[in-house]
Amino acid sequence: MRENDPVTSATRQPQTPAAAAVRPRLIATDLDGTLLRDDKSVSPRTVAALAAAEEAGLEVFFVTGRPARWMDVVSDHVHGHGLAICGNGAAVVDLHGGPGAHRFVKVRELARENALDAVRLLREAAPDTVYAVEQTYGFYQEPDYPKLHMEIPDELAPAEDLLAPHAPGAGEPVLKILAYHRTLDPDAFLTLARLAIGDRANVTRSSPSALLEISGPGVSKASTLALCCAERGISHEEVVAFGDMPNDVEMLTWAGQSYAMGNAHPDVIAAASGRTVANNEDGVAVVIEQLLADRQ
C-alpha cells in the first residue's frame, strides 16, 4: 500500500525483453508505481492495452497491496472475471459490483494470535513503531499512527486492544497489520522486522517511507496468485508479471516472465527477468503491446 504522495519516476530505461519460452495466458500487474501513473490515473494507452489483452484471450489480474475499498481507480477495467488480489494476497475480491459493492471471494487472514505476536516482537525491536489494523471492511489504528491514507479510522486504540478478542470488529478477519516508524530507513526497518517476527507473519513493504505491511504466514501476492492460477489450470510459466516495490519480489520471481518498472526498487530489478520503462511512461502497456504483436 503506497502513501498518497507522488513517487518520482526514474529516467527512461531501455526495455529488456524477458525470454518467452511459453505463450502467456495471464497478466498480473501491481497498481501503484506500476500500472498507475503517479497521479493515480490509468492512462488511455494503458486502458487500451488492457482491453486488447482481454480481447486476445489473456486474463488480467490486478495484484496490489491496496485494500478492496481503494480499488475504484481500476474497477472499470477488470473486464471478464472481475477479480483482483488485494492486501498483498490477503484477499481475492470481485469488483463487478463497483465501488463499495465488492464481494470477498477468498480471504487469507492474519490470525489475531500471530498479529499480537508480531506487534509484541516488533515493539521490542523498534519501540517507537506505531500500528494500524486492516480488516476486510474496517480500518483501525493507534492514536499516534499518522494519517497516511486519507481516511478516518473506525477506532483509535493501542494495537493490543484493537486485536483483543472483544475488540471492535473482532468478528471480522484481519488482513494485515501496518507498522510505521518515523525515523528508520525503510529497507533497514524491513530487515529488522523480518528478523524480529520470523515465521509468525509475512513482512513486506510498498511505501517509500518506513511503513511495513504484515500478513499471515505464507501470504503474499505470489502465493495467492498461484492459487488463482491453479484454479484456472494456468502454470507459472504462462504468467507475465509487473511490479516496482519489495512486495512484488515474490510474484516477479514466481512468474514465467516478469518486468521491473523503470522506477523500481533495486530488489525488484534483481528479481525480474526483464525491465520496462517507468509507470509514468506506460511501461506495462509497452510490454503488453509487444506481447500482443508477437502473438500475431
Image (cartoon, helix red, strand yellow):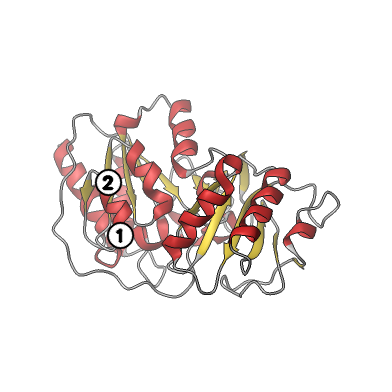
Residue at the limit of the structure toward the front, as seen here: 124
| Residue at image mark 2 | 272
Mark 1 and mark 2 residues within 8 Å of each other at the beta carbon: yes
The Cα–Cα distance between marks 1 and 2, rounded to whole angstroms, is 10 Å
Q: Which of 265/185 is in front? A: 185
> For numbered disc 1, what is the local secondary structure?
loop
- Residue 295 sits above or below residue 47 on the image: above
Q: x, y percentage for residue 252?
A: 34, 43
N-term mark: 1 or 2: 1
| Residue at image mark 1 | 264
Instruction: Report the amino acid beneath label 1.
Output: Ala
Q: Residues within 10 Å of mark 1 (few under 14, many from 20)?
A: many
Residue at the limit of the structure toward the right, as seen here: 166
Q: Residues within 10 Å of mark 2 (few under 14, many from 20)?
A: many
Q: Residue at x 43, y 51 (%)?
A: 247
Q: x, y percentage for residue 176?
A: 61, 52
| Residue 217 figure quarter | top right
- Residue 272 sits above or below residue 229 on the image: below
Q: Is residue 75 visible?
A: no
Residue at the limit of the structure toward the top, as seen here: 233
Q: Quadrant of the C terminus?
A: top left
